[in-house]
Amino acid sequence: MLNIGCHLSSSKGFLAMGKQALKLKANTFQFFTRNPRGGKAKTWEPSDTAALLALMQEHGFATLVAHAPYTLNPCSADPSVREFAKSVMAGDLANMELLPNQYYNFHPGSHVGQGVETGIDWIVSLLNETLRPDQTTLFLLETMSGKGSEIGRSFEELRAILDRVQLREKMGVCLDTCHVYSAGYDIVNDLDGVLEQFDHVIGLDFLKAIHLNDSMTPFASNKDRHEKIGQGSIGFDAMVRFVSHPKLRDLPMILETPNELPGYAQEIERLRDAQI
Ligand code: FE
Ligand code: FE
Ligand code: ZN
C-alpha cells in the first residue's frame, strides 16, 4: 500500500491533522513545526501529540514529516541569522521528541555569495551543535532545485554535508521530485539512472521520504514552482512509475502541490489507484 499524504495546516493541532489525513485517505502527512515564516513556535500540547500517536497506531500510519520554517538560513553570512536558525532547530527538536521517531525535514540553506564550501561549513557546524545522541527524531536534508545560491542542488552537496556530521545516524534525505527534476536529474526518462546516482553518491539507505510534486517549469530550469500531479513537466505517467518503483514505493510520500483539501484527496486517490 502506498504511504501517501499531503501537507496540512497545523492551526487546529495534532489530533485534528490526523483526523483530517484519514478523511483524505492519507496515512501520513506533513506539517510546519511553527509559522512557516519563522518566529514563535505554536504550542505543542503533550496530550494532543499523544492523541495523534494513538490515532496513528490505530490506523497504521507511516512516519510523519515535520517541515522546518523555509525561511531559516542555516548557512547565512550573517551570524545572527545562523544563530536564529540554530535556536529554532533546537526548539523544534525538543518539540519533535513529543512525537518520537518521526522525520524533521529542512532546507540546507543558501550560501548568499560565500561559496558552497563555506555554506556547507556553516550547516555542518549547526548540525553538530544541535543533534543529540539520545534523540529519536531523524533530520532530513531536502534536495533543492538550485535557485539562487541554494545548497543541496546536487547529491554531491548533500553527501558533503552528511560526510561531516558526527551523528550521521540521525540524518537522512528527503527527495523532492519537483526540485530534483528542476535541478537536472531526469526522473522522467531515466529514473533508474537517477536512483543509481543517488545510491552511488549518498546511498539509498539515507533516502527516507519523498515530496511528491509535479513541476511548473521545464527540466533543469533550476526553478522551484510546484504543479498539481499530472499537470506539469513531469507528468502523470512518470509520477506513477515513481511511486511504483520498488526502491521508492514503501517511503512516505508527501504532496506539496498547489491544492485545497479536495484536490489533495483526489491526487491521493488517483495515485493509490494507479500504483503498479
Ligand atoms: Fe521544502
Ligand atoms: Fe519540498
Ligand atoms: Zn519546492
Image: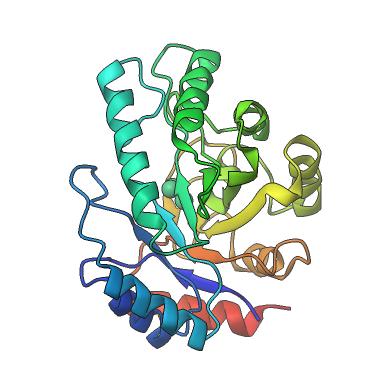
Q: Locate residue 87: give its quadrant.
A: top left
- Residue occupying the point 49% across, 88% down: 58
- Residue occupying the point 74% across, 78% down: 276
Look at the image and tell me whether residue 70 can be seen.
no
- Residue occupying the point 50% across, 53% down: 137
Spot the residue most to the left.
40
Q: Locate residue 44: give its quadrant.
A: bottom left
Q: Coloured how?
A: rainbow
In front of the other: 127 or 81: 127
- 265 with respect to 222 (left or right): left
Residue 90 position, x and y percent, is 36, 40
In front of the other: 219 or 167: 167
- 64 with respect to 172 (left or right): left
Q: Tell me if residue 201 comes above or below residue 53 in the rendering.
A: above
Spot the residue most to the front.
134
Residue 186 position, x and y percent, is 69, 46
Q: How many marks?
A: 0
Residue 269 position, x and y percent, is 52, 83
